[in-house]
Image (cartoon, coloured by chain):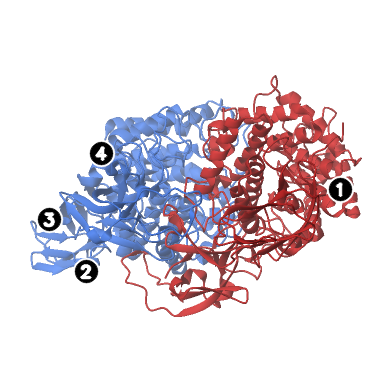
Chain colours: A red, B blue
């Protein structure tokens, strides 16, 4: 009962769909942009996160609960702090799967023991409810986060079961006991409601996939169907905050709290796939399309309102009050990946790449020990260095902070980076698809059992050349498919048969490959200038510069003493790339301070020009307090 | 002890300053724009507000408290609901002073009896704290609003004492008992803290002025000095939310919750004036200047963030997520009026006029029975009609709602409109100053005791002609001063001596006036096009059209089936005024929907032009659900 998984060692393993995911035993990232981040994540972030969770008492809560000594007044953390510990467990599980780190495995097992000791005989497990002096179980579904916490517990157990199916640590058994309790308590004859924070939906679906226990998938389906039927009490942020305003299959766009919306959508795709519900899948596809076309930042970030950490109306995408929560980026990757597996369309991998490079990679500092919770696209005032000894408010960071009072984002980034190789490639019966470009080794079998081994070499995104070498293959033809990102007009593919254009979308090579064959994709990496849809009022008259998958930014550190508010982009002077640096020309326009900021000012004076570098957005704020903008007003 | 006032029947009556306010017995608005609104306020809004407060139990809370039967679970309203009842009392008091309405006076007295019955023997009065099952008094200074509620009680009592100094209703005595309790409890030897919501500061100062009891002014000064010294606990919105981040005399700009910030600033001016503290007054002047230059909407609205109902950073003034709370507009009027009395500068009256016409007048519907809590400058989706039978969430209104769960704004508008005549004119030793233009009668004495009687006739702001007729005057020269608004370039003044230019600021006529003398000010009322400071990113490339003191708006109702998002202003075609309607030419640009809203779109197609009317912003959303924008993107 505690093992039995035959699904890939990957976060998502649908029982059907267009593409089959590969596990961490089949694909590894071996270096480059993401390899470096994986190394920092494993070497620094995981220990940093564990340290803070111990220090803040979030792990100790389990010990106190197990000992029967948990005082509600002394309990550390917010109502959802258990979930952070589970996300750390999930991150550790993927990291152990990736690196086989024995020391980390020991820490993982120790943590599982402490968590498991707090589980109650009927499977319930939550340090914030149900004990003397605490509120009763499920007495606050709107804000209590109990099912949300279970969801992250299940995801941790699934990660462990898939990467170490024979482990005897007991995490899967803990999760199954909890899941059985949930099925019984919230099943067709149980509490007919949902959790204020979706998350158990994708988690139950994966637990069902990992264990083969269909009840979990059915419970996920039940939670998805109940959502939007008004089972939750009214709250001042409105029912759309937790997506209880409209049934999932009737909604046309993501709305409300951006993390909740994406987690729910991800779980609903899982349910649609497992129950072969094409109507539901169509609805989710429409929601994805409208959200991307109208409610997504150029970085891929989602959620433009601080109030409610929420999506705004269509085209309300202010740069300077962008919320763009890191966790919403993680949730968006979860949603897109599931649609990619179901439908195989490259647009989903395009958004994932954009979000990974410009949201997920932006959150952690270069050292991996400080994080962004929100990811603004315009910093108007230089940040002050956050305290290193106490947790910061979640949305106040203008510089990365080591920890937050609500610290969902650091472990969410950690689990995403540790399991990132699972998003690099897929297979189907006829071939292998490369979705994300990183130096990597792929050793897998196609859907029909044929063995394929590839090496990918690339300095992407510094360089646009991706070289795929066939290391081993059986002597029958198959198809290698490579994604050509939506921005990569003019890409070329070299195969043993010659060079061909590689139009945006995907490009495929069908042939009888032999060991040593090389396929090269050349993506054009010249800087591009992007203008916003006219309905995005907040950045009218501005452009963003992008290069490959990276959105660029202007940081005041590169302007000498000038603030980013005081410059205008002289687009006529061109955008140059010199020695790997993107250079633009800006006019410096000192602010005209007056008593009233509205009137009929005369034109700009003849402003001095200078050439300044742009940096990758994800690299900003690594050189001390600064101001920054992605969208540059035109001169 | 319950009377003793010799101050004018006006909201603010400093014991010193450049200008002396006039009471409602000295100046009356007799018709026109504001006269109509005063009539609707008195005839409809006051009863509407009283009805809802009864219905929601906010008045009943006092009965239950007096009867000892107030169950914490059954108590109606939020923790600050007592204050709304006090604001209604204040509005009634001014209205009775304005109209001498006996029926209203009866309702006022009945309400005072119910409030007074709940007062405890030591003067404490609050239906939300201190009773069995309730939290102890002053156990939650951050959010409890106890001193805030006292503040509004004091303001109601001051309004009554000044308009009906001989009334025997007992309200002033209730207020004084409460104020004595506050002085004792929070005095130099008492609780060394402040209330999370400023308001008691100006209220104590006025109670001191009205009663001559200096202890109240000293208590106001103490609260002002304590603010910003970190006496309140940390909250997730940050200490600037309630201005406890920086001492008042060290701050350079308003910040945090916009209502709190303005109320505090108003009270601090009172303290500075009464204690002759020029340093403090200078600091407040700087705060006003910076707030107006960098953190104020073209409407005069303040507070750009929904999160925390707060000021944003400098120049963060999004049109489509403008909070611009009605109460912040009221608070801004309070702050500016006090500075005007202290310093006499017309800029304060300019901002008051802008805010009165475009924030305060925007909140109530034409019928006076529905209100805006927030005042957005850009409505992207047509609103749905709010329910008439239940209270609406406070910031969700895209149409005016009859009542809000947090309903601070309706009674705040009501008290402002009822007492509005007090802001029309002032006197000093040498003359009389007209600050706001409305048909009105002024019967007063100058500072040196000379009698002056004036009639003002005008159709302002429909028309720019303001005719002042001297009805009676003593036979000595004095000075009549008229404000020339900052936008009124080219104004002219006609006096018995001829016509002269009236430059922006103030224009004065010093002469030996005689009964029948007429002075006419002609303000240019052609529509004006205003451009935003380049640092206001949210409305870059847009203009606003203004006419006189009114900001104009484009409402979809006037565009046939077209949404305001789909038009661009063709400024080259000019702005015309025909039969009192302002007409502009717009190009209709159908949205170009695509899968991704960033790219390098080609230029706009040749778009059809049409001439459409603009309306006064304060009139919008009186014709059903619509979309609207103040800032119009240029073609």
Q: Are marks 1 and 3 on the same chain?
A: no
What's the CA distance linking mark 1 and mark 4? 73 Å
- Disc 3, disc 4: CB below 8 Å? no
Query: Which comes sooner in the sequence, label 3 or label 4?
Result: 4
Q: Residue at x 51, y 33 (%)?
A: B77
Rendered view: A280 above or below B31: above
What's the CA distance linking mark 2 and mark 4? 34 Å
Element marked by disc 3: strand
Q: Chain of mark 1?
A: A
User: Which residue is the extreme one toward the top?
Assistant: A189
Query: Which comes sooner in the sequence, label 2 or label 4?
Result: 4
Q: Quadrant of residue B113?
A: top left
Q: Residue at x 31, y 48 (%)?
A: B554
Residue at mark 1 = A108
What's the CA distance linking mark 2 and mark 1? 77 Å
Mark 1 neighbour density, 10 Å: few (under 14) some (14–19) many (20 or more)? many
Image location (x, y in percent) of residue A186: 70, 25
What's the CA distance linking mark 1 and mark 3? 88 Å
Residue at mark 4 = B39
Element marked by disc 1: helix
Q: Quadrant of the C terminus of chain A?
A: bottom left
**Nearer-the-camera pick, B203 or A420:** A420
């Amino acid at each position: 009962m505690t093992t039995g998984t035959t699904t890939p060692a990957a976060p998502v393993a649908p029982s059907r769909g267009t593409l089959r995911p590969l596990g961490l035993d089949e694909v590894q990232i071996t270096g480059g942009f993401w390899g470096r981040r994986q190394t920092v994540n494993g070497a620094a972030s995981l220990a940093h996160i564990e340290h803070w969770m111990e220090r803040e008492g979030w792990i100790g809560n389990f010990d106190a609960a197990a000992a029967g000594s948990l005082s509600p007044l002394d309990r550390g953390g917010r109502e959802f702090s258990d979930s952070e510990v589970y996300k750390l467990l999930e991150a550790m599980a993927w990291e152990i799967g990736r690196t086989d780190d024995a020391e980390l495995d020991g820490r993982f097992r120790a943590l599982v023991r402490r968590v498991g000791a707090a589980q109650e005989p009927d499977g319930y497990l939550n340090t914030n409810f149900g004990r003397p002096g605490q509120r009763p179980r499920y007495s606050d579904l709107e804000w209590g986060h109990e099912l949300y916490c279970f969801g992250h517990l299940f995801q941790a157990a699934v990660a462990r079961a898939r990467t170490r199916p024979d482990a005897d640590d007991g995490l899967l058994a803990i999760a199954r006991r909890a899941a059985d309790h949930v099925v019984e308590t919230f099943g067709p004859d149980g509490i007919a409601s949902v959790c204020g924070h979706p998350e158990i939906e994708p988690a139950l679906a994966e637990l069902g996939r990992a264990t083969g226990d269909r009840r979990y998938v059915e419970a996920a389906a039940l939670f998805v169907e109940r959502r939007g039927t008004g089972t939750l009490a009214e709250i001042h942020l409105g029912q759309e905050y937790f997506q209880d305003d409209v049934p999932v299959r009737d909604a046309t766009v993501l709305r409300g709290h951006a993390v909740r919306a994406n987690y729910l959508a991800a779980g609903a795709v899982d349910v649609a796939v497992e129950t072969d519900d094409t109507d539901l899948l169509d609805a989710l596809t429409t929601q994805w399309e409208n959200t991307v076309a109208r409610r997504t930042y150029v970085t891929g970030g989602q959620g433009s309102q601080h109030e409610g950490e929420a999506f705004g109306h269509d085209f309300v995408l202010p740069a300077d009050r962008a919320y763009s929560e890191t966790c919403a980026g993680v949730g968006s990757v979860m949603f897109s990946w599931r649609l990619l597996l179901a439908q195989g369309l490259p647009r989903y991998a395009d958004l994932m790449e954009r979000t990974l490079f410009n949201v997920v990679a932006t959150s952690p500092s270069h050292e991996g020990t400080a994080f962004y919770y929100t990811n603004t696209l315009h910093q108007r005032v230089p940040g002050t260095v956050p305290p290193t000894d106490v947790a910061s408010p979640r949305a106040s960071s203008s510089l990365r902070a080591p920890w937050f009072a609500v610290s969902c984002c650091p472990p969410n980034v950690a689990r995403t980076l540790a399991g990132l190789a699972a998003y690099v490639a897929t297979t189907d019966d006829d071939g292998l698809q490369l979705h994300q470009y990183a130096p990597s080794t792929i050793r897998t079998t196609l859907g029909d059992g044929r063995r394929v081994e590839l090496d990918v070499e690339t300095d992407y995104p510094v360089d646009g050349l991706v070289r795929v070498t066939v290391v081993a293959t059986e002597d029958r033809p198959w198809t290698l498919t490579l994604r050509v990102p939506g921005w990569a007009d003019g890409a070329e593919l070299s195969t043993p048969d010659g060079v061909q254009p590689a139009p945006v979308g995907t490009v495929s090579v069908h042939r009888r490959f032999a060991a040593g064959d090389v396929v090269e994709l050349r993506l054009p990496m010249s800087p591009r200038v992007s203008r916003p849809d006219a309905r995005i009022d907040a950045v009218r008259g501005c452009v963003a510069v992008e290069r490959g998958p990276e959105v660029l930014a202007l940081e005041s550190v590169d302007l000498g003493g000038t603030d980013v508010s005081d410059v205008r982009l002289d687009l006529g002077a061109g955008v140059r790339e010199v020695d790997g640096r993107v250079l633009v020309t800006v006019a410096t326009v000192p602010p005209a301070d007056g008593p009233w900021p509205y009137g009929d000012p005369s034109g700009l004076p003849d402003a001095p020009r200078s050439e300044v570098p742009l940096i990758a957005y994800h690299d900003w704020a690594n050189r001390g307090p600064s101001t920054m903008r992605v969208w540059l007003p035109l001169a």
